[in-house]
Image: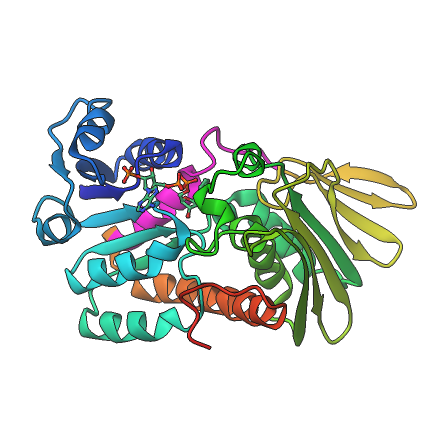
Amino acid sequence: MLRLGIIGTNWITKQFIDAAQGTGRFELTAVYSRRLAKAQEFAAQYEQEVGLFDDLHAFFSSPDFDVVYIASPNSLHAQQTLAAVNAGKHVIVEKPMVANVADFDALDAAMAAHPDVFVFEAARHIYEDNFHRVRQFVDSHEVTGATLVYMKYSSRYDAYLAGKEPNVFTTKFAGGAMMDLGVYLVYAAIGWFGVPTHATYLPTMLQSGVDGTGVMHLSYPDFDVNMICGKTTQSYLPSEIYFGKDTLRLDAPESITQMDFTTPEGTAQLAGPQEDNPMAPEAAFFGDTITSGDHAAAARQLQLARQVHQVMTDMRLAAGVKFPGDKQ
Ligand SMILES: NC(=O)c1ccc[n+]([C@@H]2O[C@H](COP(=O)([O-])OP(=O)(O)OC[C@H]3O[C@@H](n4cnc5c(N)ncnc54)[C@H](OP(=O)(O)O)[C@@H]3O)[C@@H](O)[C@H]2O)c1
């Protein structure tokens, strides 16, 4: 059984713990929060004995857990991942795992010093069966383009408009539309079509310095992919992958339940069922991979993460969306 520690006590952590414990591979044994009372309150939801921490150094030094799930604000992911690896803990870190691809340099060095440690970015959608179905479909058909959309009005945008500073709308915490939602689209594009030859981003900026919405354009040798992400507007548009006169329409690239393939002859539904907890497939992969010691599988996922963050960092910096942690 893998003993799980967590950072971040919002709803997403509970959803991940439910998925992880549901695999039968993980058991929650340690909770970190900036406030001990909050750690206690969070741990009280679970029956088992759980170690409580409000000091990150003591948390990482603790023998209470083997794997940490990190769901803190984005700009803290890289440094917390680094501290965990240096403490010999396996890491499952929420998307985006780095704010800037340059953050991989220190991580690579730490992982070289701790070769037994596993590090995963929790890009949950790429572990879903329907995501794999799309890739298999794309592999066996000639793609002529795609339009991918993930634009959702954020529950925190009203607070932003009221003059507050929700983490996800600040540069300090590496927020904004591309970091929060665009990352799902970049994962989809690279996962399905490979690394683009060129990528650009046209953001619509908020006064706080982050992008509220934006349009990404990815060029491939034989086609282009257009992608729209946003947190200040609600879209109901589906996403589409084109094959000349035929079209594969997805209800949502970040969580596919519908895959309609339309040809001049008619429409076929290609999607399979989805798990109730959207984090269940990734939790199963992480648990199986660590338990079986499959470093090659983990390295493939990390290589994909690196490609995603290279493209995102390049697009973001060229578009003038800057974070305090950027070194370039
Ligand atoms: N995979 C998914 O489907 C999914 C969905 C939602 C979010 N996420 C990811 O999960 C991460 C957390 O998102 P969220 O919306 O929960 O973020 P958040 O509410 O801003 O913060 C998450 C946690 O971090 C701690 N925290 C808050 N402000 C902090 C600060 N100023 N300094 C240090 N720690 C702070 C809090 O825990 P304590 O108070 O206990 O310290 C909080 O519960 C993000 O990276 C996001 O991209 C993923």
Which quadrant does the N terminus fall into?
Answer: top left
At 52% from the left and 54% from the top, the residue drawn is 179
**Along the viewing direction, whichever of 205 and 288 lies nearer the viewer:** 205
Q: Position of residue 298 (x, y in %)?
A: 35, 61
**Along the viewing direction, whichever of 177 and 17 lies nearer the viewer:** 177
At 49% from the left and 52% from the top, the residue drawn is 175
Q: Position of residue 192 (x, y in %)?
A: 62, 59
Vertical comparison of 184 with 234: above or below: below
Q: Is residue 168 left or right of residue 19?
A: right
Q: Is residue 221 left or right of residue 7?
A: right
Q: Position of residue 234 (x, y in %)?
A: 68, 36
The reply to whether the magenta stretch includes residue 280 is: yes
The image's colour scheme reads rainbow
| Picture quarter with ligand 1 | top left
Q: Provide the residue span drawn in magenta.
A: 272-290
The residue most toward the front is 163
Quarter of the image for residue 178 reads bottom right
The residue most toward the right is 264
The reply to whether the magenta stretch includes residue 106 is: no
**Along the viewing direction, whichever of 95 and 284 lies nearer the viewer:** 95
Q: In this view, does 260 lie to the left or right of 36?
A: right
Q: Where is residue 243 in the image (x, y as percent from the top left)?
A: 81, 58
